[in-house]
Amino acid sequence: MWQAILESKERIIFKKVEKPIPRPNEVLIKIKKIGICGSDIHAFHGKHPYISFPIIQGHEFSGQITEVGKEAKRFQPGDNVTIMPQVVCNRCYPCTHGNYHICQNLKVIGCQTPGAAQEYFSVDENLVIKVPDNMSYDFGAMVEPLAVGVHALGKLSELKGINLLVLGAGPIGNLAAQAAKGLGVRTVMITDINEFRLEIAKKCGLDYPILISREDLSQAIEKHFGEAGVDATLECVGLQATIEQAIQIARKGTDIIVVGVFSEIPRVNIGFIQDKELRLMGTLMYREEDYHVAIELIQSGKIHLQPLISEYFSFMDYEKAYRFIENNKNKIMKVIINMDK
């Protein structure tokens, strides 16, 4: 079988290796679709602080089980699946208290350990999530980023009937906003500086897409929500400007959930956080229940995934996919590697 290896900055090579034999507790997955996400793009350009070369990427994907190890009991050949790409120690305090997603020794498949950018992938069955037979492989590969949004929303004490602000209309912001609507949030305002992304947000049924280069955010909040403002904010960008904005416009006594990954350490106005009694919280990855909620949201038709898919590339054109993203970054949401072509 073939593997795609990110050997060095902006260079992907292909290596032919033997198809893996699953260990007793593993299943072997024939990879069908792989989504390229922001962390993959940063790694390709040598800008990810926690990913080193060489690495086999691929942590958003779908596939079909072809073999099961002799001790694997949860799945059978023919099952369509995705995975939670979390390698955890099961020994540290978070792991032993139900918070394995923030394991102190966490490694992410496709980032710190080999990922699914290969024709077959063998993985511990405890990381595998079955997806419905009638769910497309495209959508199966997008369960993982949707679960990120579901988990972030789980940090809020209340969802039903609230007004939510989402800063950043990229794939994660869009999916988090859609999940919020699906889980009972009354109204979602989503912002970006990219008009294309906001057009996608409109297609996905989000209430108030705000192009902040043309419209003042504080005025937009007052226009649509009145003096009450927003009840909670998701920061899905990871920039100094947006975390500052989140704190600046927050109504007193509200929540800010940090979803975006910051490549540089930001400065925040702690005085505002103290004076407004804001709750500033981080969120990382997901737990298994978040995957099941994500799948239910997709199956119920409450999540619109097709508008997010910008382009497909064949496996052997993996590097071309990154070049395409770089050359069209203002008009791209999700690029998918099609392993069957």
Image: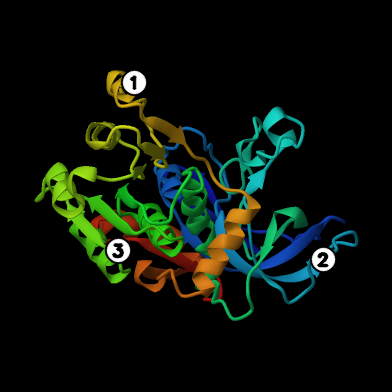
| Mark carried by residue 274 | 1
What residue does disc 2 label? 68
Task: Check if mark 2's residue and mark 1's residue have beta carbons within 8 Å.
Answer: no
Q: Residue at x 74, y 61 (%)?
A: 18
Evaluate whether residue 10 shows in this view.
yes
Q: Amino acid at mark 1?
A: Gln
| Mark carried by residue 206 | 3
Q: Earlier in the sequence, mark 1 or mark 3?
A: 3
Q: Amino acid at mark 3?
A: Leu
In the picture as drawn, the residue positioned furthest to the left comes out as: 214
- Look at the picture and state if 116 lies above or below 310: above
Report how far apart the C-alphas of labels 3 and 2 lie in the structure.
41 Å
Task: Check if mark 1's residue and mark 3's residue have beta carbons within 8 Å.
Answer: no
In the picture as drawn, the residue positioned furthest to the top comes out as: 271
Q: Amino acid at mark 2?
A: Val
Q: Nearer the viewer, mark 3 or mark 2?
A: 3
Query: Neighbour class for label 2 at 10 Å: few (<14), some, many (≥20)?
Result: many
Report how far apart the C-alphas of labels 2 and 1 lie in the structure.
53 Å
